[in-house]
Protein backbone atom coordinates (compact mmCIF):
# COMPACT_ATOMS: atom_id res chain seq x y z
CA UNK A 1 0.00 0.00 0.00
CA UNK A 2 1.44 3.38 -1.03
CA UNK A 3 -0.83 5.52 1.13
CA UNK A 4 -1.29 7.83 -1.85
CA UNK A 5 -5.12 7.75 -1.82
CA UNK A 6 -5.53 7.02 1.91
CA UNK A 7 -8.16 4.44 0.87
CA UNK A 8 -8.80 1.47 3.15
CA UNK A 9 -11.45 -1.23 3.21
CA UNK A 10 -14.42 -0.45 5.45
CA UNK A 11 -16.35 -3.43 6.77
CA UNK A 12 -19.99 -2.45 6.32
CA UNK A 13 -21.50 -5.83 7.17
CA UNK A 14 -20.32 -9.14 8.64
CA UNK A 15 -22.44 -12.03 9.86
CA UNK A 16 -21.31 -15.57 10.57
CA UNK A 17 -24.53 -17.28 11.61
CA UNK A 18 -25.89 -20.28 9.73
CA UNK A 19 -28.71 -19.12 7.51
CA UNK A 20 -31.91 -21.10 7.26
CA UNK A 21 -31.33 -23.98 4.85
CA UNK A 22 -32.56 -22.70 1.51
CA UNK A 23 -34.53 -25.07 -0.70
CA UNK A 24 -34.67 -22.85 -3.76
CA UNK A 25 -37.70 -22.59 -5.95
CA UNK A 26 -38.00 -22.06 -9.67
CA UNK A 27 -37.58 -18.58 -11.18
CA UNK A 28 -37.22 -16.01 -9.63
CA UNK A 29 -35.80 -18.29 -6.95
CA UNK A 30 -35.42 -17.89 -3.19
CA UNK A 31 -33.09 -15.89 -1.01
CA UNK A 32 -30.11 -17.83 0.34
CA UNK A 33 -29.69 -15.48 3.31
CA UNK A 34 -32.93 -16.30 5.12
CA UNK A 35 -32.53 -15.60 8.84
CA UNK A 36 -29.72 -13.09 8.27
CA UNK A 37 -29.85 -9.41 9.23
CA UNK A 38 -30.50 -7.22 6.17
CA UNK A 39 -27.47 -6.65 3.95
CA UNK A 40 -27.71 -2.90 3.43
CA UNK A 41 -25.89 -0.50 1.11
CA UNK A 42 -26.01 2.94 2.78
CA UNK A 43 -27.26 5.94 0.81
CA UNK A 44 -24.65 7.94 -1.11
CA UNK A 45 -22.26 4.99 -1.11
CA UNK A 46 -21.75 5.46 -4.84
CA UNK A 47 -20.57 9.03 -5.47
CA UNK A 48 -17.26 8.74 -7.33
CA UNK A 49 -16.57 7.83 -10.96
CA UNK A 50 -13.33 7.77 -12.88
CA UNK A 51 -10.02 6.22 -11.85
CA UNK A 52 -11.13 5.79 -8.22
CA UNK A 53 -14.77 4.90 -8.70
CA UNK A 54 -16.94 4.01 -5.71
CA UNK A 55 -17.03 0.26 -5.16
CA UNK A 56 -18.15 -2.50 -2.80
CA UNK A 57 -17.00 -6.10 -2.41
CA UNK A 58 -19.51 -8.77 -1.37
CA UNK A 59 -18.04 -12.00 0.00
CA UNK A 60 -20.37 -14.86 0.83
CA UNK A 61 -20.11 -18.61 1.25
CA UNK A 62 -21.44 -21.73 2.86
CA UNK A 63 -22.48 -25.29 2.06
CA UNK A 64 -24.19 -26.66 -1.04
CA UNK A 65 -25.86 -29.98 -1.64
CA UNK A 66 -26.75 -31.43 -5.03
CA UNK A 67 -28.36 -34.85 -4.91
CA UNK A 68 -30.99 -37.05 -6.50
CA UNK A 69 -32.13 -35.68 -9.86
CA UNK A 70 -30.06 -32.50 -10.18
CA UNK A 71 -31.92 -29.64 -11.90
CA UNK A 72 -30.39 -26.53 -13.44
CA UNK A 73 -29.07 -23.90 -11.04
CA UNK A 74 -28.77 -20.12 -11.43
CA UNK A 75 -27.51 -17.57 -8.90
CA UNK A 76 -28.87 -14.01 -8.74
CA UNK A 77 -28.02 -10.83 -6.87
CA UNK A 78 -31.25 -8.92 -6.40
CA UNK A 79 -31.62 -5.53 -4.75
CA UNK A 80 -34.41 -3.34 -3.43
CA UNK A 81 -34.68 0.16 -2.01
CA UNK A 82 -34.53 -0.05 1.77
CA UNK A 83 -37.64 0.67 3.81
CA UNK A 84 -38.26 1.37 7.48
CA UNK A 85 -40.28 -1.83 7.80
CA UNK A 86 -38.80 -5.30 8.07
CA UNK A 87 -37.36 -6.12 4.64
CA UNK A 88 -38.92 -8.86 2.58
CA UNK A 89 -37.20 -10.79 -0.20
CA UNK A 90 -37.63 -8.85 -3.44
CA UNK A 91 -36.72 -9.71 -7.02
CA UNK A 92 -37.84 -6.52 -8.74
CA UNK A 93 -34.30 -5.21 -9.38
CA UNK A 94 -31.47 -7.47 -10.56
CA UNK A 95 -27.86 -6.36 -10.13
CA UNK A 96 -26.52 -9.52 -11.72
CA UNK A 97 -26.97 -13.22 -12.44
CA UNK A 98 -24.95 -16.23 -13.53
CA UNK A 99 -25.74 -18.36 -16.52
CA UNK A 100 -27.98 -21.36 -15.97
CA UNK A 101 -25.88 -24.46 -15.30
CA UNK A 102 -26.35 -28.06 -14.17
CA UNK A 103 -23.99 -29.30 -11.44
CA UNK A 104 -22.18 -32.32 -12.82
CA UNK A 105 -21.73 -34.26 -9.60
CA UNK A 106 -23.74 -35.14 -6.50
CA UNK A 107 -22.23 -33.63 -3.35
CA UNK A 108 -23.47 -33.19 0.21
CA UNK A 109 -22.59 -30.06 2.18
CA UNK A 110 -19.63 -29.11 0.01
CA UNK A 111 -18.13 -25.67 0.60
CA UNK A 112 -18.85 -22.87 -1.88
CA UNK A 113 -17.66 -19.27 -1.90
CA UNK A 114 -18.45 -16.17 -3.94
CA UNK A 115 -16.88 -12.75 -4.39
CA UNK A 116 -18.80 -10.06 -6.26
CA UNK A 117 -17.41 -6.62 -7.07
CA UNK A 118 -20.08 -3.91 -7.21
CA UNK A 119 -19.10 -0.54 -8.61
CA UNK A 120 -20.35 2.74 -10.05
CA UNK A 121 -19.92 3.11 -13.82
CA UNK A 122 -21.94 6.26 -14.48
CA UNK A 123 -23.47 8.79 -12.08
CA UNK A 124 -26.78 10.52 -12.85
CA UNK A 125 -29.63 12.24 -11.04
CA UNK A 126 -32.53 10.15 -9.79
CA UNK A 127 -32.79 6.45 -10.54
CA UNK A 128 -30.45 6.62 -13.53
CA UNK A 129 -26.97 5.68 -12.31
CA UNK A 130 -25.30 2.55 -13.68
CA UNK A 131 -23.96 -0.10 -11.32
CA UNK A 132 -21.74 -3.00 -12.41
CA UNK A 133 -21.74 -6.34 -10.54
CA UNK A 134 -19.04 -8.82 -11.59
CA UNK A 135 -17.74 -11.88 -9.77
CA UNK A 136 -17.92 -15.63 -9.46
CA UNK A 137 -19.33 -18.50 -7.40
CA UNK A 138 -16.88 -21.36 -6.82
CA UNK A 139 -17.25 -24.94 -5.58
CA UNK A 140 -16.60 -28.52 -6.62
CA UNK A 141 -20.40 -28.84 -6.71
CA UNK A 142 -20.57 -26.48 -9.66
CA UNK A 143 -18.68 -28.68 -12.14
CA UNK A 144 -20.78 -28.37 -15.25
CA UNK A 145 -20.50 -29.81 -18.74
CA UNK A 146 -22.84 -26.99 -19.80
CA UNK A 147 -20.16 -24.40 -19.08
CA UNK A 148 -17.26 -26.56 -20.24
CA UNK A 149 -15.45 -26.13 -16.94
CA UNK A 150 -13.16 -28.68 -15.32
CA UNK A 151 -12.75 -29.74 -11.70
CA UNK A 152 -12.77 -27.05 -8.97
CA UNK A 153 -14.89 -24.83 -11.09
CA UNK A 154 -16.46 -21.43 -10.86
CA UNK A 155 -19.59 -19.91 -12.29
CA UNK A 156 -19.21 -16.31 -13.41
CA UNK A 157 -21.52 -13.37 -12.81
CA UNK A 158 -22.50 -12.24 -15.37
CA UNK A 159 -22.62 -15.34 -17.52
CA UNK A 160 -20.95 -15.60 -20.93
CA UNK A 161 -22.24 -13.29 -23.65
CA UNK A 162 -23.39 -9.69 -23.89
CA UNK A 163 -23.56 -7.82 -20.59
CA UNK A 164 -26.00 -5.06 -19.72
CA UNK A 165 -25.34 -3.58 -16.26
CA UNK A 166 -28.04 -2.31 -13.90
CA UNK A 167 -28.85 1.26 -15.02
CA UNK A 168 -31.62 2.52 -12.72
CA UNK A 169 -29.79 2.89 -9.40
CA UNK A 170 -30.63 5.90 -7.22
CA UNK A 171 -27.44 6.80 -5.34
CA UNK A 172 -29.34 8.86 -2.75
CA UNK A 173 -31.27 5.79 -1.51
CA UNK A 174 -30.27 2.91 0.76
CA UNK A 175 -30.63 -0.55 -0.78
CA UNK A 176 -30.91 -4.11 0.50
CA UNK A 177 -29.01 -6.90 -1.24
CA UNK A 178 -30.66 -10.29 -1.79
CA UNK A 179 -28.37 -13.12 -2.97
CA UNK A 180 -30.63 -15.82 -4.38
CA UNK A 181 -30.69 -19.17 -6.15
CA UNK A 182 -33.20 -20.47 -8.66
CA UNK A 183 -33.58 -24.13 -9.65
CA UNK A 184 -35.05 -25.48 -12.88
CA UNK A 185 -37.17 -27.75 -10.69
CA UNK A 186 -37.46 -27.38 -6.93
CA UNK A 187 -36.31 -30.53 -5.12
CA UNK A 188 -35.62 -31.18 -1.46
CA UNK A 189 -32.27 -32.74 -2.35
CA UNK A 190 -30.75 -29.53 -3.72
CA UNK A 191 -30.04 -26.94 -1.06
CA UNK A 192 -27.77 -24.06 -0.10
CA UNK A 193 -26.86 -22.93 3.41
CA UNK A 194 -25.02 -19.63 3.83
CA UNK A 195 -22.48 -19.70 6.67
CA UNK A 196 -21.02 -16.20 6.36
CA UNK A 197 -21.49 -12.93 4.52
CA UNK A 198 -19.32 -9.79 4.46
CA UNK A 199 -19.71 -6.48 2.62
CA UNK A 200 -16.74 -4.14 2.26
CA UNK A 201 -16.72 -0.52 1.14
CA UNK A 202 -13.56 0.06 -0.90
CA UNK A 203 -13.66 3.68 -2.01
Image (tube, helix red, strand yellow):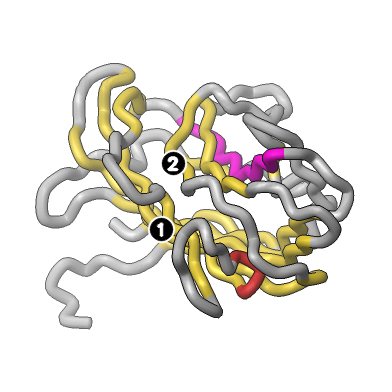
The count of marks equals 2
Q: Are marks 1 and 2 in contact (CB under 8 Å)?
A: yes
Query: What residue is shown with label 2?
Result: 96
Magenta span of residues = 174-184
- On screen, 61 above or below 191? below
Disc number for residue 51: none
* Secondary structure category for the residue under label 2: strand
99 left or right, relative to 56? right
Indicate the secondary structure of the residue bearing disc 1.
Answer: strand
Kindly report the distance in space between the C-alpha atoms of the residues bearing marks 1 and 2: 9 Å
Residue 176 counted in the magenta span: yes
Question: Which of the labelled discs sits on residue 135, or is there none?
Answer: 1
Work out whether mark 1 precedes mark 2 in sequence or the reverse, and give the earlier one.
Answer: 2
In screen coordinates, is 46 left or right of 106?
Answer: left
Q: Residue at x 43, y 37 (%)?
A: 95
- Between 28 and 114, the one lying in front of the other is 28
Q: Residue at x 22, y 82 (%)?
A: 1
> Residue 171: horizontal and vertical position, in percent?
33, 30
Amino acid sequence: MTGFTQTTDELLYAFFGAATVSVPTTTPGATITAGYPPIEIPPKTFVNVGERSSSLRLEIGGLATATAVIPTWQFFLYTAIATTTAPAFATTLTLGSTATFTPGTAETNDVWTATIHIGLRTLALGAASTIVAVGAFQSDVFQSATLGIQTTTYVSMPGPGAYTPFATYDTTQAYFLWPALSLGAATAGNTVTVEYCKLYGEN
